[in-house]
Structure formats: structure tokens, C-alpha cells
Image: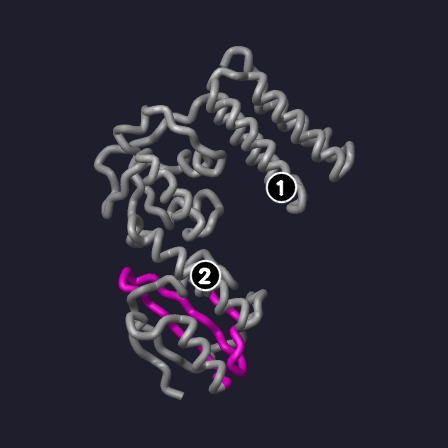
Amino acid sequence: MKLQGSLAELKLPDILQLANMSQETGIIEFRNNEGVIGKVVLQDGEVIHARVGDLSGDEAVYEIAIWFDGAFRFVPLDKEYSQNIQGNLTSLLMESARRLDEWRVLSRKIPSFSYFPVVSEESDEKRTLNTAEWDILRYIDGEKNIRDIAHECGKTPFKTSKLVYGLLINSLVTLSRFPAEQKTEKEVPPLVAKLLKIKDETSKWVEAGLLEDIDKMLQDGLLRLNEDMNDKKAVIETANAVLQAVMLGMGRDASRDLAVRFKSILKGQAGS
């Protein structure tokens, strides 16, 4: 089957459905208008492997799904590929369609992942941010584009874009096609920085099932800090609540080990 063309005319879901109907085995190579390359590997019409830059598996498929422009072509298999796709074709198509709808909204302010967030001159105004927005703000310096920031903070470019979109709406950052001439950063308040470090340590050591509840605790702590950026008690009580949750969910030893790391973070707080 000769399968090639323009992404402006045929989007990923349609391409995958055509390949599935023909039970194709091979590679669909994609290149967007910024030169980013992706590949989707098919076995008898089923997607078994995908990669775009640092992204692999389902997330790589979802990134290609939001490319509005570019080209694609079908080529024979050049080697064996291990399976890194978790979902079946139906789930991939449904999530791809959902992401594409969401990206149509985000792209009104964020044309692509190659744009550079720059801290706004208005960023000194008091704003209420959530932990995820404070977290991403740490990496914004005007020298890294959205894809670079995603790589550095361990998030996908799509998720990073959603967070940057919130900062754009709040006028905390602007977006530039090119790097800023001078490095621009927003100073994270000291107690917020401690809370974010607690979040980092927790993410490293705690089971995934506990993270959602713990993230709510961290968000509650941040809400208290938004009322008073000098509320040291808010950070201490949040840390203790997290340790209590870890003890109940993972046991006393896990809580004790994490407490040692928290102590290091909180050390010297009296002088903050």
C-alpha cells in the first residue's frame, strides 16, 4: 500500500485507521513543519511501537496526533521493534481525538512546543498559583522552549503546554518565537520552594496510588501560603500530613525514611 501525504489533509487517526483496514506491517514516518521526526510501527495493522524525540509509546502517538502540518510516508520495517504501546487502536484513537480537541484551544496562545516562555514584567503582581504552576515556573528562564522545559522537568510537552497556558492566562509569562536576550526568571518564594521540594521528594519515593491524595495535601498547604507567604506553620503541618499518609499507606519505615529527607528540606526554616 502506498501511504504518504500531508498532515494538513490527513490526520494521524485517519492514517492509522487506513493502515489498520489494510493490515499493514511497516513504519509510518512523520515530520512536522519544524523538522521534528516521529515514527509509528505497525504489525498487521496494529500499533506496536512509537517514538518522537524523548517520548515513546502512547504519548508519542498522542503528540503526532496534534500536529496540524507536516508530512508522512509509509516505509518497510528496517528491524524488529519492541512493543511499547499500552493501549489498543480504539483507545489510541479516542485519546488522540481528545488531545486534538484540547490542543485546538491551547494552540490559540501556544502555536507549538518550540516557543519560549518568558517571565512577564507584570509577574510581581500577586497571583494565586497551584503547585503544578509554581513547579513549572521554576524552569522558565526565557532560554528554554516548551519542549526543553518538558525534558528538564520530566513532563510531556503537552502537559507542560497546559501549565504554560495557565501562566499565560494569568499574565505571568509571555511567549516568544526566539530565546530571550536576557535571562528572565521569577523568584519562587522561599516557603513555596520548600513545599515544592517536599513534592519532589515525595514523588521519588511514594507509591503512585498515594500521590493523588498527597498532591491535595500539598495544594492545601500552598493555598495557605497564598494567603500568607510567611506562614511557616503551613509548610510544617503539610509535611507532617504527608508523612502520616505515607505511614498509613506504606508503613512506618517508609515514613521514617521520608521524614529524614523532609528534615533536610525544612532545616533552617526559622531563618527563612
Mark 2 belongs to which amino acid?
A: Arg
Check contact, mark 2 vs mark 1: CB within 8 A: no
Residue 75 vertical position relative to residue 204 in the rendered view, above or below:
below
On screen, residue 83 versus residue 182, left or right, reads: right
Residue 56, given in percent of the width and then of the height, sits at: 49, 61
Describe the element under mark 2 as helix, strand or loop: helix
Quadrant placement of the N terminus: bottom left
- Is residue 42 shown in magenta? yes
Describe the element under mark 1 as helix, strand or loop: helix
Residue 199, given in percent of the width and then of the height, sits at: 56, 34
Q: Nearer the viewer, residue 262 or 117?
A: 117
On screen, residue 262 versus residue 137, left or right, reads: right
Dot 2: few (<14), some (14–19), or many (≥20) neighbours within 10 Å?
A: some
Say which residue appears at 49% left-offset and 34% top-offset: 131
On screen, residue 257 versus residue 159, left or right, reads: right
Which residue position is annotated with label 1? 211
Residue 119 vertical position relative to residue 14 in the rendered view, above or below:
above
Q: Residue furthest left?
A: 181
Q: Which callout, 2 or 1, points to the residue nearer the camera?
A: 2
Residue 217 vertical position relative to residue 111 in the rendered view, above or below:
above
Q: Which range of residues does the magenta coloring cover?
A: 23-51
Q: Main secondary structure of the magenta part?
A: strand
Residue 262, given in percent of the width and then of the height, sits at: 62, 26
Dot 1: few (<14), some (14–19), or many (≥20) neighbours within 10 Å?
A: some
Residue 140, given in percent of the width and then of the height, sits at: 36, 37
Mark 1 belongs to which amino acid?
A: Leu
Say which residue appears at 28% left-offset and 28% top-offset: 122
Which residue position is annotated with label 2? 98
